[in-house]
Image (cartoon, helix red, strand yellow):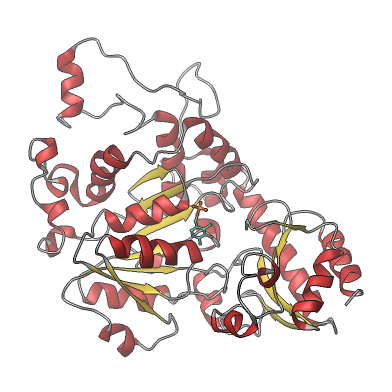
Amino acid sequence: MKKLRKETLCVQAGYEPKNGEPRIVPIIQGSTFKYDSSEEMGKLFDMEKSGYFYSRIQNPTCDNVAAKICALEGGSAAILTSSGQTATFFSIFNICGCGDHVIVSSMIYGGTYNLFHMTMGRMGVEFTFLDPDCSEEELDAAFKPNTKAVFGESVSNPALVVLDIEKFAKAAHKHGVPLIVDNSFPTPLNCRPFEWGADIVVHSTSKYMDGHDSTIGGCVIDSGNFNWDEHADKYPSLTTPDPSYHGVIYTKHFGREGAYISKMTAQIMRDLGAVQSPMNAYILNLGLESLAVRIERHCSNAMKVASFMKDHDKISWVNYPGLEDNKYSNLVKKYMPDGTCGVISFGVKGGRKGAEEFMKHLNVSMICTHAADAHSIILHPASSTHRQLNDEELVASGVTPDLIRICVGIENVNDIIEDIDQALSYI
Ligand SMILES: *Cc1c(COP(=O)(O)O)cnc(C)c1O
């Protein structure tokens, strides 16, 4: 089939209705699937045949939607998960265990930091957090004999740091390990990490992909490029027999393109069961159908809001990766020339008090902790999510007392700007 463009993939990829079937991905809200004979079902358990038997392992609706995201990223296989947190956890846990080590960009989502540092730390996985702007030498020096993966965010939440994907991929490959990239903020519409050497991509589909503040979900996508067999000693769970499936060897049975996701499905999902429900996958798919149109509007609205803020005398600083004078503007031009995302952070005059006053008077942008959906939403961490910290502690955690994060929605941009303007007059 002709290679289709990303806007077309958003609408059509992952599901091809047969004669007389529904045009949209149908919701198969079933737990189990019927077979004519035990032998036939047995073949599924032996992995001799592929098919569905229980929705904790695989479900057709979820598979169709995962296949769409896989096509958008340009990957070889993908799986939906119950949340972005699960996607991140599975992406690491699939190839790491007690005694292993992972290198992580220090500019990541707070939930990911807690997952790695606290929860996976208790499981015996060790993480080294590294400034993503480090030199190649510093990055190189962070590897240990037991390093199994490198992890970073293409555009970090909330700091909006842009990852030099190629620099991280080169270092990872030099040491024979894969690079995993969380691509939730730019989405594959604006950034395709596989084209720059990333091996695995994860998403919180709760953000722009769903885009309507209506479902929590995640996705893990494999590029199919990492050669596990070449580093077989590091990844025995993929390259040696799995006793829970009559000794199947994932890289032999499913090849380089299928091993990583097949093992995640057959073993990690089977045992932990953090599936996305078919109903949620259906809602996610509705979001994906309009993703190309929405992300374009998010970016153009955010650019106008950021430019307005730059010139406003009540605003002391603006951080938006799309701005020409942004620290990461060269990386943006290279990795996401069509735009970044709709998220901006900025500081208002008058510090914490000024920010609190400003927040009180907004009408269009609403106060929420979430990020990245159709509605404009805004957060002042110092008076909400981070309110237990004093000013010094805030600065140390990278969140200044005046910092406000706005996720610019797809409303009319003039309404968003006029609302901000009138609220600023109260400072
Ligand atoms: C929100 C978020 C997550 C976590 O996703 P959930 O769907 O909330 O579990 C992970 N990474 C990034 C970059 C996020 O913004």
Observer-nearest of 142 and 201: 142
- Residue at image x 67%, y 63%? 299
Q: Is residue 282 above or below residue 87?
A: above
Q: Is residue 91 above or below residue 42?
A: below
- Residue at image x 47%, y 18%? 19
Which quadrant is home to the N terminus? top left
Q: Is 155 left or right of 303, judged from the image as shown? A: left
Image coordinates for residue 131, horizontal then vertical, percent: 43, 82
User: Disc count in the image?
Assistant: 0
Q: Is 102 left or right of 371, judged from the image as shown? A: left
Observer-nearest of 218 and 14: 218
Say which quarter of the image contains residue 106: bottom left
In this view of the protein, can residue 38 be seen by the observer?
Answer: yes
In this view of the protein, can residue 194 be seen by the observer?
Answer: no
- Residue at image x 65%, y 82%? 391
Q: Is 309 left or right of 391, judged from the image as shown? A: right
- Residue at image x 31%, y 34%? 57
Which quadrant is home to the C terminus? bottom right
| Residue at the top extreme, as displayed | 36
Image coordinates for residue 62, horizontal then vertical, percent: 43, 35
Say which quarter of the image contains residue 38: top left
Say which quarter of the image contains residue 407: bottom right
Observer-nearest of 326 and 272: 272
Image coordinates for residue 205, horizontal then vertical, percent: 52, 49
Image coordinates for residue 91, horizontal then vertical, percent: 33, 55
